[in-house]
Image (cartoon, rainbow, N blue to C red):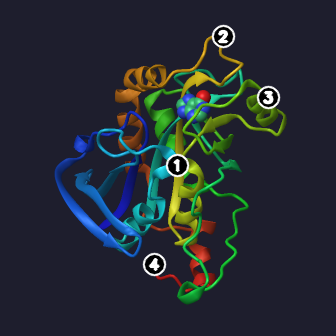
Amino acid sequence: MLELAIIGGTGVYDPRILDDIREITQDTAYGKVTLTIGQYHGQEVAFIPRHGSQHSVPPHLINYRANIMGLKMLGVKCILATAAVGSLNLDLKPGMFVLADQFLDFTKNRINTFFDGGEQGVFHCDMTVPYCSELREAVAQAAQECGFALQNGGTYVCTEGPRFETAAEIDMFKQLGGDLVGMTSVPEVCLARELGICYANISIITNYAAGISPTILTHSEVLQRMKESTSKVRKLMLESIKNIKPERNCDCVKIMDQTGVKQ
Ligand code: HPA
């Protein structure tokens, strides 16, 4: 049964982390999604490279609704999502993993809900703790088993992109309590929550953010850092899958009582 999915961010494009892979296209009310389904540790796992297999889709143009709805239609209940991020916190160093537990939303032009009125109705989704605590625990335990430096908890500031931030913006985000900055976790995590899917963000720090870094930022620097982390990311994801329990007792599931969305 397919219940787990990996959404690979920048630098995580290769579905061959799974065995026995096959590609499928899932039609949704929001557009088509092409994804790979494979096996790991006796479980079926879906894989979507968020930016496309060749990194051709920028953060502000990702069809987040099609991706999340496509996974829901296939029966997915838990998503592990990777994200390359900048660090606003000197204690969180390049190469470290952080599991975000909160976000600050600075996106501007994204469709961020399945509930647009009309047939879907209006729904105000709880977002007190957007990232699933049980899934985070499974990943944190895996990091410990692998001996990887990981912080469980941190505030992810989501910007609209595709440009990097100004030093003044980073200074403001820091004063607001941000630890990490990236361009994709919102609305992805919100859409997952609206459908009752557990979602964990595995942030991989690729650089210190603008104004903290002594040099200007480049996408190639981010890609290079991700390349250096590939084997660790892969190992962390796969070990995490082994730790995910089939029964869910987290708040993510309770949303479905309010929306009428089915398991
Ligand atoms: N800012 C925004 N997104 C990012 C960064 C950053 O510094 N690094 C990796 N993704």
Q: In which quarter of the image is residue 16?
A: top left
**Which callout, 1 or 4, points at the residue further toward the start of the chain?**
1
The type of residue carrying mark 3 is Asp
Q: Distance between the residues labelled 2 and 3?
A: 15 Å
* Quadrant into which the N terminus falls: bottom left
What's the residue type where badge 4 is placed? Gln
Disc 3 element: helix
* Quarter assignment of residue 212: top right
Tell me which residue sits at (28%, 56%) in the image. 35
Q: Tell me the mark number nearer the camera, choosing from 2 and 4.
A: 2
Badge 4 element = loop
Residue closest to the eye, 98 or 29:
29
Q: Are marks 3 and 1 in contact (CB under 8 Å)?
A: no
Residue that appears at 61% across and 75% down: 255
- 10 Å crowding of disc 2: few (<14), some (14-19), many (20+): few
Looking at the rendered structure, the kind of residue marked 2 is Pro
Q: Which mark is residue 214?
A: 2
- Residue, x 80% and y 38% (percent of image)? 177
Nearer to us of marks 3 and 1 is: 1
* Mark 2 C-beta closer than 8 Å to ligand 1: no
Q: Earlier in the sequence, mark 2 or mark 3?
A: 3
State how far apart marks 3 and 1 are (Cα).
23 Å
Q: Which amino acid does label 1 sit on?
A: His
> Could you say which disc has been placed on residue 60 in the image?
1
Looking at the image, residue 177 lies above or below residue 256: above
Quick check: 141 above or below 133?
above
